[in-house]
Amino acid sequence: ESCGHIRISVPVVRLGDPVIASCTISPNCSKLDQESQILWRLQDGPNQPGDRQRRLPDGSQESTITLPHVNHTKAFLSCLVPWANSFQVLDQAELQAGYPPASPSNLSCLMYLTTNSLVCQWEPGPETYLPTNFTLKSFRSRDDCQYQKDSILDCVPEDGQNTCSIARKHLILYQNMVIWVQAKNMLGTSESPKLCLDPMDVVKLEPPVLQAVDISPDLIPYQPGCLWLSWKPWKPGEYIEQECELRYRPQLRRANWTLVSHLPSSEDQFKLCGLHQAPVYTLQIRCIRSPLPGLWSSWSPGLHLRPT
Amino acid sequence: ESCGHIRISVPVVRLGDPVIASCTISPNCSKLDQESQILWRLQDGPNQPGDRQRRLPDGSQESTITLPHVNHTKAFLSCLVPWANSFQVLDQAELQAGYPPASPSNLSCLMYLTTNSLVCQWEPGPETYLPTNFTLKSFRSRDDCQYQKDSILDCVPEDGQNTCSIARKHLILYQNMVIWVQAKNMLGTSESPKLCLDPMDVVKLEPPVLQAVDISPDLIPYQPGCLWLSWKPWKPGEYIEQECELRYRPQLRRANWTLVSHLPSSEDQFKLCGLHQAPVYTLQIRCIRSPLPGLWSSWSPGLHLRPT
Amino acid sequence: PLPWPRSFLLKSLEQVRKIQTRNSELLEQLCATYKLCHPEELVLLGHSLGIPQAPLSRCSIQALQLTKCLSQLHSGLFLYQGLLQALTGISPELAPTVDMLQLDVANFATTIWQQMESLGVAPTVQPTQSTLPTFTSAFQRRAGGVLAASHLQSFLETAHCTLNHLV
């Protein structure tokens, strides 16, 4: 049976909050001089006496100490007694301090057609100094996300990551689902606002590959300042009906983009004329799921072409 | 119950060997004209009749075919009958051809002190064209490796890798162990020659870090053509008694190395003189476990210094 | 009966295209790997194995009955989801395509079922899978898979026509 035993009011407190600890030396601790003064040591600080030491009815000695402001996020509090010309550590307690988690924010999700997974990311909020677990939670709902149709799925991110990937087998495409993030540590729990989305409405679409088309002069009469283009939708998303936008500008300093909207997602021969401002033009295309809801793809890499 | 059934003499043969197959159409296969000629198709080749077709006592029709030389490593053999103005596939058998595994060769092992694992590698031998499993097998032995003290440990390499890593918990350091590789496929099994080694005798030692030492002139009288060096053993292997070798040469075309052997593994001030052939000299050091058996470390990266 | 909402039609068309794309990938893989490239050569085997074909008679443009068409669509998708089950375990190379196809078919069935619920024409109890054919050899399982996938392809063709006609 060990001689000393520490009890703390709360092992984990908010940074700056007080902590009360008591150390009790049992009477049947033969090797110790029962009258010795119980001392305390925080981390490798000085040995200091408690606020109060008293003998309990059962003969054991009890010292109590109050640490007014815990400002170590992690510290060890030891209880000692003088012994020979040194000290003996009788017990040690671990103190942790930090903050309860703030609500995770900026939760956003993208559906990747290449990996067939819905990847969500969020901002964790300020440092809590305590081990804090984030869990991406979701359940299937009906059109208006008002009520829960399935059990809640927990997606646990890889260590320290603020992103989580929900595998295809857990997703029901074309149905709304409710998604949110829960943050939990020893001092509390918080939740992000809830998202209501159909994974297919947040598909990460890639732009088509824009290509120049060689038109042989005998087919089409020569026209100066023109270009013929073709593009095909990005393969993994070709079943998605899309609408595209083309932008082009002459390779001149401070040249502005000209935009051509409402283009089809596939085009074999698209003629662009009136390109007289410079020998070389830069062209880019991007697409969006339409008429169903979706997100714009990024612009395709710049294509630099010489008009006729 | 399906109408046709293929039987093959052997589903896996040596490349170039013959295979005999038979296809039997049961009499109670109502939809079929019992007299129809049974045809064969290898992969997507032409439909060809068998060598012989006969009616069996129980009324079923049986066609037999011999493929004299199987030269597909993997092929599908189908049994068909004419039907309406097309054909009907009644059954299909998978044929595989390849070679039994040759004995794996050049088995060698190194003990890595950083990962605490014994990593062995080998050469698998010629392509067998068949799924072939390699297993690194080992058991603890006594000094002369003559007999087996423990059960055999199987180390299964990652897919297609010809290397396997035996974790520390499976190793008894400073004891001999017998290690070999077994290769197995449908056509046979083979084994590499056996190694008898103590993991600590094959430690992959890293060279020390060679450094120049600045000797202040007032301490030691100026001497032209000299250099002072220091080195410390590689941290993870510092408990291993080692002997080192230094080599140096002037930075001249076709300069030869000069070797200084039997050096200690740790040196604070090593004086090297007689360096008059060039303004800059290149120096390298390597060490080996000694007097206990071991392997030379690689040479340290070249250190380029200007003698005094 | 109530017309089908445009968003339902557009989503269903997209799902049909998605499944058709993946289903033809599966048929290509079955052809490339097992040389089973002509479903018409497996008709006899299909009969003996009892591979069913889902009817879509109430969805044909000529005899279109919206409510019955919806329930035929749902039961057909439900049937093919089960039939594709036969393909799992055929080979590691095929597994990803089959798994995704099954999920896409199941999700499309959910879209249809939800629409039936919205229109108040959904039966109270979800259908249960009828007994599926059993396969006694790897060849039967592959041939069953080719037949199921090719039946599914023509099933989707009809569905695509109907949905296109309505959108």
Image (spheres, coloured by chain):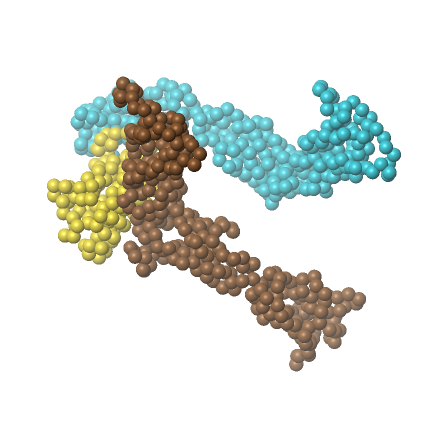
Chain colours: A brown, B cyan, C yellow
**B32 displayed left or right of B241:** left
Q: Quadrant of residue B46?
A: top left
Residue C39's place in the image compared with C74, above or below, is above
Is residue A307 visible to the viewer in this orientation of the structure? Answer: yes
**B207 displayed left or right of A147:** right
- In which quadrant will I find the C terminus of chain C? top left
- In the displayed orientation, state which residue is furthest to the bottom: A57
Residue A114's place in the image compared with B302, above or below, is below
| Nearer to us in this view, B250 or B79 | B250
| Nearer to us in this view, A232 or A156 | A232
| Nearer to us in this view, B292 or A236 | A236
Rendered location of residue A246, percent (x, y): 34, 36
Residue located 20% across and 41% down the image: C164
Rendered location of residue B227, percent (x, y): 80, 32
Residue located 19% across and 39% down the image: C161
Q: How many marks?
A: 0
Rendered location of residue C159, percent (x, y): 21, 41
Is residue B198 visible to the viewer in this orientation of the structure? Answer: no
Residue located 70% across and 74% down the image: A28
Residue located 30% across and 39% down the image: A261
Residue A52's place in the image compared with A134, above or below, is below
Rendered location of residue A35, percent (x, y): 74, 76
